[in-house]
Amino acid sequence: MRVLFTILTTLIIFTAYAQDISEQLKFDIKFGMIKGGEVYFQTSDTLYSNIQAKNARLYGFTTGFAHMLYKVNDSFESIIDKSNHNPIKSFKNVSEQNYRFNNEVHYYHHLDSAWSKETGWHRIEPGVADVSALFYKLRFSGILDSISQGDTISLPFWDTGEWYFVEMIHNGLETIKTKYGKRECIVLKPLNIEGKFFSKKDPMEVWLTNDSQRLPMLMKLNFNIGSVKCILVDSKV
């Protein structure tokens, strides 16, 4: 379950960027027909050290039988500079069964540096973002407007005490049934997913609406023992 929520929160990062309208998205996690958890993404305007900014928060938790088996309650939060869309500060609070991790990171993009409360100073790629800031990045940055089937997206991503590039390939368009009716979606697949738990064929897929909102309608993880879906069930603007 810990692997699942880590991957889901990493996966959900491919969704939103720099809009002035605050928003809340709600996702249900499904194991077949069984609901195993919920994930939320929220944004709001804020002022940080006289900088016009966005507060972006991503959090997820188990429910029902899944919560009885393995309790998860994770939260990722960022303060994002609206002028350049880069995170200024981020917070990570992880509670998974008996595991706990809390950290705070400050980003100095003009110095190619970041300071982590847990691990100290690090060299970074300019524009690097943690999970909640990167979650706030893809939808309205225009990245998807300039790519077509077969092209790849590469974004610098901060995770705990290191950064690396997250890469996904544009796998074409597909019309799927959703709570909001049939929607044409861009299908994205990650290129750097590894691990013995994942299926060798199509380990992960993401469906984003092919319109100005770029809503993440569906995410699917294929494991050797079965599939898990993360489904958008509510959107408030």
Image (cartoon, rainbow, N blue to C red):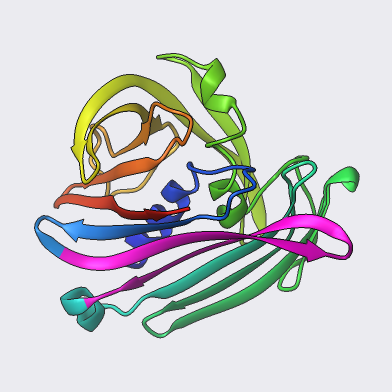
Judge left or right: residue 179 versus residue 75.
left
For the stretch drawn in magenta, what is the main secondary structure? strand
Give residue 78's position: percent from left, percent from top.
65, 61
* Picture residue at 25% right of the left edge, 79% below the top: 67
Q: What stretch of residues is rendered in magenta?
A: 35-63
* Picture residue at 26% right of the left edge, 33% below the top: 202
Specify the farthest residue to the left: 33
Give residue 120's position: percent from left, percent from top.
79, 67
* Picture residue at 53% right of the left edge, 44% below the top: 16
Judge left or right: residue 22 versus residue 183.
right
Q: Quadrant of residue 103?
A: bottom right
Magenta span has 43?
yes
* Picture residue at 58% right of the left edge, 30% below the top: 154
Q: Quadrant of residue 184?
A: top left
Judge left or right: residue 230 versus residue 149.
left
Q: Is residue 48 above or below residue 213?
A: below
The front one of 127 and 182 is 182
The N terminus sits in image quarter: bottom left
Q: Is residue 215 above or below residue 41?
A: above
Give residue 75's position: percent from left, percent from top.
51, 70
Magenta span has 130?
no
Q: Quadrant of residue 92?
A: bottom right
Give residue 93's position: percent from left, percent from top.
55, 75
The front one of 43 and 6 is 43
